[in-house]
Image: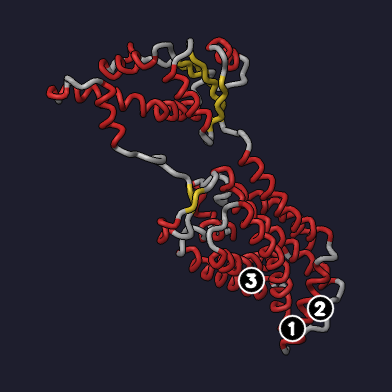
Amino acid sequence: MDMKRLCKWFLLLNKRLYKKISFILILLLIPVLVFSYSTAAEESSGVITIALAQVGDDEMASGVIDSLLEQNSLIRFLSCETPQSAKDLVSDGEADAAWIFPRDMEEKVYRFVATQSRKDAFIQVVERDSSVPVILAREKLSGAMYANCSKAMFISFIRNNVPELNDKTDAELLTHYDAISVDGDFFRFSFMESAESAQEAHDANYLLTPVRGLLAVVTVLSALAASMYYMRDRSAGTFSWIPERKGALVEFGCQMICVLNVSAVILIALSFSGLSASLGREVLILALYAVCTALFSMTVRRLCGTLTTLGTVLPLLIVVMLVICPVFFDLGMLRALQYIFPPTYYINAQYSDRFLALMGVYSFALLLVYYLTGKVLRRK
């Protein structure tokens, strides 16, 4: 088949594809998905809610509360006018916990650092229940208090171990503390093109991390839909004039046309989501993933055998991939099963060059299963 005829076939099959409402809906799902997550990432959200309040008007307490309110984290912080209003939110179930900061907080911080006794603990914590997120949230409180406690520890250490500086005031000693520049966070959420290029990491929003996995699942959905289109066309005799030995190539061509259209929309969507680090790498990953997804759907189509069976299995496969593949969570106990499904390779290929090679191995394995399924089950 010459190039001119090949291009004509591509245009005709592409035109047929865009006449199908279900395929257009899949394409529209991609920007809607990315836009929805991007919008959610800009809004206040969190796994748990913590109410913040202070007794009286304390400068240090106000500073800590402001720093917590400004942070973008899995914890949603609410500022309350009085400690009682914060406790009411917890009792009414509108907050998971309340952190109440005392009056004369600076004095209490220095006393706590000096004694290291729980009796001198100065922040009141009110919790509705002791769940894992609430327990982990206390680490956020410790982190917020670190700057103030570390200053008190610094002064306490100097007073106890460097007597020649006893004539210095606390303010003078803190000039040495402030001279040690520690900018930024101890931990930064980011993504990088590969493990070998960690220095090129880009800042990211944790709320956008499932987007790549969801787009990978949508690609598989489109490929399985393409298999259903192919089965209908074959039943209608659309490809009856094509020699049987070329049937697999025709099916693969139909699959690739569908998946490449979806990949092009994904590429555009990723550029707006803030997850795309490199255009070249994204194109390479999407191209390899398109082959994986096409072969996967071809194999599933042969295993199912009939259009009815494939239509029944399709929603089940989507749910299984969302649970088993590392879209939202990476379940260690199911990690071995993840490698059965294409999204696992796409998600990990962004961060590991090893998965680029594994996509090639996976594609070959799928091709082998597709061939053996045709021989053993005698299916075209």
Q: How many circles with numbers are drawn on the protein?
A: 3
Q: Position of residue 195 (x, y in %)?
A: 42, 58
C-alpha gap between disc 2 and disc 1: 15 Å
Q: Secondary structure at mark 1?
A: helix
Q: Nearer the viewer, residue 98 or 338?
A: 98
186 is higher (above) or lower (below) than 229: above
Q: Which residue, given by chain and number where applicable, does mark 3 sit on? A: 370
Disc 2 residue type? Phe
Q: Residue at x 55, y 21 (%)?
A: 51
Q: Please tell me which residue is depicted at 75% across the width and 81% down the height of the picture.
A: 7
The kind of secondary structure element at disc 3 is helix
Q: Which residue is mark 2?
A: 239
Contact between labelled residues 3 and 2, with CB atoms less than 8 Å apart: no
Q: Earlier in the sequence, mark 2 or mark 3?
A: 2
Q: Residue furthest right?
A: 236
C-alpha gap between disc 2 and disc 3: 20 Å
State whether residue 167 is above or below residue 216: above
On residue 6, the disc is 1
